[in-house]
Amino acid sequence: MRVLVSVLVVALAAVVPPVAVVGSAAATPPRAELIAKSVTGDLFNGQITVTAAVRNKGDKKAGASQTAFYLSTDGKQSANDTTLGTVDTKKVKPKHSMPVAAIFPLPTNAAPGSYRVLACADSGKQVKERNETNNCKASKAAITVVSQVITVSAAAGTGGTVAASGVTGGTCAGTACTFPTPGTGTVTFTPTPSAGYRFGAWTGPSCTGYTAGAGNAITFTKPTASKTCTATFVKQVTVSWSVSSNVPGDALCCTVTATATGGTCTPDGKTGSCTVDSGASTVTLTAGGTAPPIIAFTGWTAAPLATCVGTTSGAVNEVLTITNPTSPQNCVANFSFGGF
């Protein structure tokens, strides 16, 4: 009987291995497991701001790694995704999360369309994970990419021209310049008034963000939005004057003093002129140097083939006021000696 029991014990021992041995051989070693969560993306002025949280679902600390961001049309990682860039990610304790964020320029190869931002934890496979296939997560909201070509142009109004110069990072056809990448390139527009005009101002609802320079030139540096500017010019007129007299030695007398609003005048004297904005200025001419009754101011007249239209005032009408002239005028201040 003892022999039979012993044989059964040996047989059972051979068939059923010890419990301790089974548990030791089948135990799963602790591993990290990184996943991306809470992914967001925002596109503004040619730059994409991205955020995400890298969570360690595993039971072992994850070492330093990298998180990659992409633009994805379907929210799933594939060779068709457009790479934005990577962010260094610190170590992550088990059951903890690490925030990551970055700002990337919009890739020049991103075609116009709707995209979701895709974040992939441990993109460089630096962490030995329990599951290597669940690293990526897409944003819930999509961003829209429109044509990235920036157009900056300038036109000239009546009375002048505009020229483009100093172009970098783009090309120009006349004064219409294109830049393939937002936030790059430079162009300067310089206005030149025609004869009889002066530069007025740069106008246009989108004509902002420029740097003003010499000669009323404007420079756009690294434009991020299309611009359309128009150079306006202001027509000018000239009011001239001269002195006519029979006064001997009249170098000592008989002059005209001139002032103007909306323009400038040459120094006072026997001849001169004021250049003013057409239809929006006032010129005042004052005859002087008289010493009645020996020397008398006898009135204003027009020079040959010219006009002189205004309002006179003063003791002997020596003040001539020309309001809002729209064409050239040439006035003569007349003096006489002894009333002759």
Image: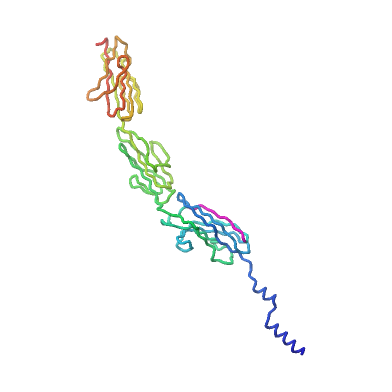
Which quadrant: the C terminus?
A: top left
Residue in the foreground of this view, choosing between 242 and 26: 26
Query: Is 90 above or below relative to 21?
Result: above
User: Would you say the magenta stretch is mainly helix, strand or loop?
Assistant: strand
Extreme-right residue of the structure: 2
Q: Which residues are magenta?
A: 95-104
Q: How is the image coloured?
A: rainbow
From where the camera sits, is residue 15 visible? yes
Residue in the foreground of this view, choosing between 284 and 108: 284
Image location (x, y in percent) of residue 105? 47, 52
Q: Is residue 78 left or right of residue 271?
A: right
Find residue 13 and report its image quarter. Answer: bottom right
Q: Is residue 7 left or right of residue 175?
A: right
Which quadrant: the N terminus?
A: bottom right
Whether residue 128 appears in magenta in the rendering, the answer is no
Query: Is 326 above or below relative to 287?
Result: below
Query: Is 239 above or below relative to 207?
Result: above
Query: Is 142 above or below relative to 189?
Result: below
